[in-house]
């Protein structure tokens, strides 16, 4: 029987040659938001390694939207040219280039992981963070995030709209809105971080309003015939937080409004979360959303083996499999998986002499 992992998937006018996706992974290797040769080699090697879709790391829609000062950005036109070059190479390898647009909110202004992942104060080059409410991520942080006022909310929405326009110019064929992992949209979604009393806080309908307004702004610039994803954290793994039932409700609304796929992750919002890490620990959330919201889903999280990924697809639990750390360990993951699943796939002609052992 043919492998589902290596079967194509068509979403709107875009066909992915297989169901293997490179999950967005920050590289903390930019200066002033610019992509460079590290990003070309990092993303390009995964394209030549045989994946169907590459979603570029969380790309900031404004300078203050960055997680760290070294994050990629797409807040000015000068960022476009290098990104376009990278995307052209990805396409040349028969892979699809995607981008994840993001705003870190209260989790912004931290150092790169290898510099301690510490909150930067203003003297260290940090900046004022923003959130749904003035609630810090850690108790010992040097300053609180500012609760976004109406003007600030409109600025973020405008930043996503402008970033989307640049993403189109740069040649991306899939766009993902980042609403997961405790970043700004997630901070509005969850009652643990959203204690507002205006139309953006309180009820479920109010807490999802910001996400829906960003979606609407993105859709004014993103071509209607290209795939549009939203990544969510299906649960906060914390009492009183965002939960799987709300994730299904939101996914139903997103589908109705034209979103094609929910990229299902979890956690990242609060430091006291309790995550039961084990293989496939997030897959049941992707399955629940797929079956109850009747929308395509992507599964991610401790999925490391070919037969494991194949089983998830065969069981109807998800439509795409996203690989993060495993793809860092092995840029040629799809070529190895194809061998394990006895699938014949096209190798880069430069590498074909290594195809048989």
Image (tube, grey):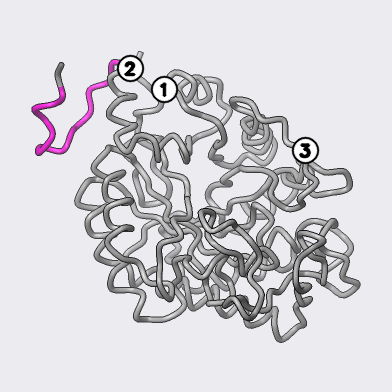
Q: Is residue 123 left or right of residue 237?
A: left
* Secondary structure found at label 1: helix
> Are there few (<14), some (14-19), or many (20+) residues within 10 Å of tag 1?
some
Do tag 2 and tag 1 residues touch (Cβ < 8 Å)?
Answer: yes
Q: Residue furthest top?
A: 1
Q: How many marks?
A: 3
Report which quarter residue 140 is drawn in.
bottom right
Label annotation for residue 306: 1
> Are there few (<14), some (14-19), or many (20+) residues within 10 Å of tag 2?
few
Looking at the rendering, the stretch of residues picked out in magenta corresponds to 340-355
Report which quarter residue 149 is drawn in.
bottom right
- Where residue 327 appears, as percent x and y from the top left, is 40, 38
350 or 286: nearer the viewer: 350
> Are there few (<14), some (14-19), or many (20+) residues within 10 Å of tag 3?
few
The residue beneath circle 2 is 340
Label annotation for residue 274: 3
Tell me which numbered mark, 1 or 3, is placed earlier along the sequence. Answer: 3
């Amino acid at each position: 029987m043919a492998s589902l992992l290596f079967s194509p998937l068509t979403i709107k006018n875009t066909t992915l040659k297989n169901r293997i996706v490179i999950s967005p992974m920050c590289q903390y290797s930019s200066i002033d938001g610019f992509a460079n040769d590290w990003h070309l080699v990092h993303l390009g090697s995964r394209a030549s390694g045989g994946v169907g879709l590459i979603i570029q790391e969380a790309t900031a829609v404004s300078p203050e939207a960055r997680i760290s000062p070294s994050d990629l950005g797409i807040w000015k036109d000068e960022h476009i040219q290098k990104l376009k070059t990278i995307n052209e190479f990805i396409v040349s390898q028969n892979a699809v280039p995607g981008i994840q647009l993001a705003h870190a909110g209260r989790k912004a202004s931290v150092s790169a992981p290898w510099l301690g992942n510490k909150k930067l104060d203003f003297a260290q080059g940090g900046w004022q963070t923003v959130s749904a409410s003035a609630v810090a991520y850690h108790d010992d942080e040097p300053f609180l995030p500012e609760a976004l006022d109406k003007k600030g909310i409109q600025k973020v929405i405008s930043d996503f709209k402008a970033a989307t326009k640049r993403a189109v110019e740069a040649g991306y064929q899939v766009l993902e809105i980042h609403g997961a992992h405790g970043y700004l949209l997630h901070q509005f979604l969850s009652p643990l971080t959203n204690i507002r009393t205006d139309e953006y806080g309180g009820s479920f309908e109010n807490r999802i309003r910001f996400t829906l307004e960003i979606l609407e702004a993105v859709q004014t610039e993103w071509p209607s015939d290209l795939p549009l994803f939203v990544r969510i954290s299906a649960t906060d793994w914390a009492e009183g937080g965002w939960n799987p039932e709300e994730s299904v409700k939101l996914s139903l609304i997103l589908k109705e409004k034209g979103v094609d796929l929910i990229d299902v992750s979890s956690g990242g919002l609060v430091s006291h979360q309790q995550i039961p890490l084990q293989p496939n620990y997030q897959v049941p959330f992707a399955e629940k959303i797929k079956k109850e919201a009747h929308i395509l889903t992507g599964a991610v999280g401790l999925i490391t083996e070919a037969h494991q990924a194949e089983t998830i697809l065969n069981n109807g639990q998800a439509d795409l499999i996203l690989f993060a750390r495993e793809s860092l360990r092995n840029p040629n993951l799809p070529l190895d998986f194809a061998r394990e699943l006895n699938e014949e796939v096209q190798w880069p002609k430069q590498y074909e002499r290594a195809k048989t052992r």
